[in-house]
Every structure is written in structure tokens, then in C-alpha cells.
Image (spheres, grey):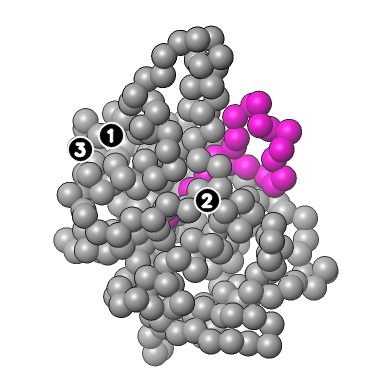
Amino acid sequence: MSGSNGATAQGVAVTFGIRAWSAWAGGLHAADDWRAWSAAPHLPAPPSQPPALPEIAAMLRRRLPVLGRVALAAAYGCAPGDSAAAVPAVFASRHGDTGRLVTMLSELAAGEPLSPAAFGLSVHNAIGALRSIDLADTGNLLAVSAGRDTVETALLEACSLLADGAPEVMLVHYDEPVAAPYAAFADEPACLYGWCWRLGAPRAGEPCYTLTLADAPAAAVPAPQLPHGLDVLRFMLAGDAQLWHRGEHAGWQWQRHG
């Protein structure tokens, strides 16, 4: 399921390299901003303005919600040059655009017709699909939502594409606080953020990472201070040796090598 994989005593492990990365959140845009943040992590504040996204066609840019702009700012910041359209992509968000969902449900409750455009942008693959349209990209696009296991599930999908022969895969993860009617169900801190990794098989002389399906020791999983997806980015940027996560249906261990 990856450029390198195998069984361990605890479970199945996938190993991968990160060729490039990009991220966007309120007050954190440049790579140096994020590296400094990883040394003193905090919950990013809401942005005063969404990303400008000059890379994307204006007609498509106008259709994007703020969450979509943040996700694509990370994706375009990590694109592999002219070959972007040839690289499979996995877009992953635990919650997606719940604000748009609440608006549509309220319209239905009031007996009003749904906007076809709003409905089209509410589906989970809409943000990745707009990127595909902008780039005229007919390549593989996956959209993933798997609760507390969303990041790990998306990584497994990306490594499966590498194992199937893709030289690189883009993994785009993004999220925002859920809309007010769902706030009572939130189980971790929340903020608006997005990041992208360009993944490939491990290469000699470069750090690589392993994700293992494993039960974490109870003391290894402290109370969350960040959304889990953002904590995974912090783990990578800080150069930590490992990160444990207890998902809804599985335990996970992230490890850095080299």
C-alpha cells in the first residue's frame, strides 16, 4: 500500500517520503512562518482575508468558499510545476463545508428550492474537482472523509496510488470549525487551515515516514491542543520522532526516520 510496505508485530505499516509541502492558515502563509509555528504551536486565528489565489481562473475562484480557497492555496503552493495535471490527488477533510450544508437544510425546511450551484459545491469532492477543471486534469482524484481517522485514511489512499505505480501523489488536507448547529459534537480544537504534501517513495539520503496501525499506550496520547490534521503537519515540520493518534476505530503511530 505504499512505495514501501510490510507487516509489523503491531499491524500494517506504510512508508513514504515527502517531496514538498505547503500550508495556509490565518497569519501563517510562508514556509518560514510554519517552521517557527511548529516550534511553538498554537491554534491559528481566523484570517482577515482569504487567500487571493491568482493561479486559478477568476470564474472558478468566485465559486469557491473560504475553505476551498484555503485548500487550493495549499495545493497550488505544492504543485509540481508543469506536470501538475499528471499527479493523482487525494483531497481529505473531516467535516467539509458544514456552513453551506446548514444553509441548504434551512432552505429546504422553509420550503425554498435549492440552488444547483450551491448543491454542486456542497459535495465532498467539489474543491478537488474545481482544481481538476482549472488544470484540465483528467487524472485520478479521490475525496476522503473518515472521522477521526481522516488524515490516516487519506495517507493510506495516497500510498496505495504510489504502490499502483504513480511516481508522486498530492495529499491535500483541510478543515474549519463546524457550523454552530453541530458545535456540540466537536471533539477537538478547531480552526481554518489547509496543507498539502507531495508524496513519493522513500529516497536514500532523505527523511522518510512510516504510518503504522497500532494501539497507542494511554500515556502517549495527550489531550489535543490542535486539530489532529494540523498536529500531523506540526509533527512533520518539527522533526519529531513519533506521533500517536487514537482514531474512532483504530490506533495509529507516525514515525520519522532519518
Question: Counting other residues with Cα less than 10 Å from the Cα at mark 1, is it few (<14), some (14-19), or many (20 or more)?
Answer: some
Identity of the residue drawn at 21% across and 53% down:
137
Count of marks, rendered view: 3
Q: Position of residue 217 (x, y in %)?
A: 80, 73
The kind of residue tagged 3 is: Ala
Against 205, is 116 above or below?
above
Dot 2 or dot 1: first in sequence order is: 1
Disc 1 + disc 3, Cβ < 8 Å: yes
Q: For this rendering, which residue is in front, 233 or 252?
A: 252
> From mark 2 to mark 1, how far is it between C-alphas?
23 Å
Mark 3 or 2: the one toward you: 2
Against 146, is 152 above or below?
below
The kind of residue tagged 1 is: Arg
User: Which residue is labeled 3 in the image?
Assistant: 57
Q: Of helix, strand and loop, which one carries label 1? A: helix
The answer to whether residue 47 is left or right of residue 9 is left
The kind of residue tagged 2 is: Ser
Question: Counting other residues with Cα less than 10 Å from the Cα at mark 2, is it few (<14), some (14-19), or many (20 or more)?
Answer: some
Residue 188 drawn in magenta: yes
Against 97, is 33 above or below?
below
- Label at residue 236: none
Identity of the residue drawn at 21% across and 55% down:
138
> From mark 1 to mark 3, how far is it between C-alphas?
6 Å
Disc 3 + disc 2, Cβ < 8 Å: no
User: Which residue is labeled 1 in the image?
Assistant: 61
Question: Which region shows up in magenta?
Answer: 172-191
Disc 2 + disc 1, Cβ < 8 Å: no
Q: Position of residue 153 (x, y in %)?
A: 53, 62
Q: Of helix, strand and loop, which one carries label 3? A: loop
Q: Position of residue 9 (x, y in %)?
A: 68, 88
User: Which residue is labeled 2 in the image?
Assistant: 145
